[in-house]
Image (tube, rainbow, N blue to C red):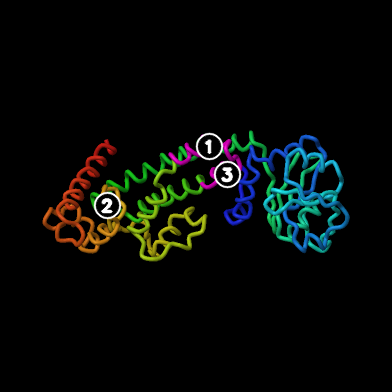
Amino acid sequence: MIYMQDREYEKFKDVLRRLAPGTALREGLENVLAAKTGALIVFGDTEDVKKMSDGGFFINEEFLPAKLYELAKMDGAIILSENGKRILYANTHLNPNSSIETSETGIRHRTAERVAKQTELLVISISQRRDLITLYKESGKYILPDVEQLISKANQGIQTIEKYRMAFEDSIVMLNGLELEDLVSLNDVCIAIQQGEMLAKMGREVNRYITELGNEGDIISSHLDQLIGDLDEELKNIVKDYSFTSVNDFDENYFIDLTEISRRLGYYSEVDVLDAPVFTKGYRLLSKIKRIPDYVIDNVIEHFEDFHSILHADMDQLDEVEGVGAVRARNIIEGIRRIRELYSFERK
């Protein structure tokens, strides 16, 4: 599966949108690729580019795929405006600093990588023999896959996400029941977070394919949105219910280990901490009740000693909470009743 780390992907995110299938830039690149002429294309006419440029001729015309195709028949590099909307120079010989390290072997690709590192601009190298379009930016490198390959990868990812979604929903159903019965262990919480984060990570991966596909990925994007749903909100509220520390510094691999998840939540112990009983504050379940603002949920949780007390509170007790009132008190009681009924149905 094609994969880039999140930070590496951010370098190319906007570029991949501009090069998505159906755009003029992508059409031009694929025309050159099909013709097997090869090309070296620099996006930007900065002072650094001018200093390393030799020869060539000034064009300054609007970008058209057909023009790129014709100009690529010449040996030198093609220089576009940074946004790719104008062709500025063609047949330009580039002389980047030869001391800049490069992992490439071919002359065109070595030049492209060095120019990208030296100028921090986007540089594209189209291979004459290997049928590859390679993007370079700063120290990053990405090989542009073809549309059919992207669609296949995206569909494979969607199938994986469907399995992850089912596993996450199972863990949430389990957590719902345990919270209603005050029987939650830290292990139950960590499993729900683990399943949710695996789903979120796979969703990000498929979303990258969708970005590259442009309009071709609309159907897959719609399916992905349905599968991901309210995942971010659900995970945020689980963490809010059980954490004793800030969790903003999670890296993408922390969720592989349940003990590491527990530590990130603020639970430190040399004994079997995952078996320890824990108690929800109630943010996640109360957020499922309609027409109850977040500030009211905050007030309710602060007013009562624990979530068990909220579950058994009557109209008068809820009415005492600032911002609740009779109508919202009735909504909370009715909402909790529906959550109990839904859990009973899901358990059966």
Residue 218 bears which disc, if any? 1
Q: Is residue 99 above or below residue 80?
A: below
Magenta highlight range: 204-226
In this view, which residue lies farthest toward the left? Answer: 316
First in sequence: mark 1 vs mark 3: 3
Inter-mark Cα distance, 2 to 3? 35 Å
Residue 286 bears which disc, if any? 2
Q: Is residue 106 visible?
A: no
Q: Is residue 232 above or below residue 273?
A: above
* In front: label 1 or label 2: 1
Q: 92 or 160: nearer the eye?
A: 92
Marks 3 and 1: in contact by CB < 8 Å? no
Residue drawn at (25%, 52%), measured in percent from left and top? 292
Q: Is residue 124 left or right of residue 288?
A: right
Question: What amino acid does circle 1 point to?
Answer: Asp
Inter-mark Cα distance, 1 to 3? 10 Å
Question: What amino acid does circle 2 point to?
Answer: Leu
Question: What amino acid does circle 3 point to?
Answer: Thr
Q: Position of residue 314 (x, y in %)?
A: 13, 53
Q: Of helix, strand and loop, which one carries label 3?
A: helix
Magenta span includes 341: no
Inter-mark Cα distance, 1 to 2? 34 Å
First in sequence: mark 1 vs mark 2: 1
Q: Residues within 10 Å of mark 3 (few under 14, many from 20)?
A: many
* In front: label 2 or label 3: 3
Q: 308 or 112: nearer the eye?
A: 112
Q: Position of residue 19 (x, y in %)?
A: 65, 44
Marks 3 and 2: in contact by CB < 8 Å? no
Residue drawn at (75%, 52%), measured in percent from left and top? 42
Which residue in the structure is indicated by mark 3? 211
Marks 2 and 1: in contact by CB < 8 Å? no
Magenta span includes 219: yes
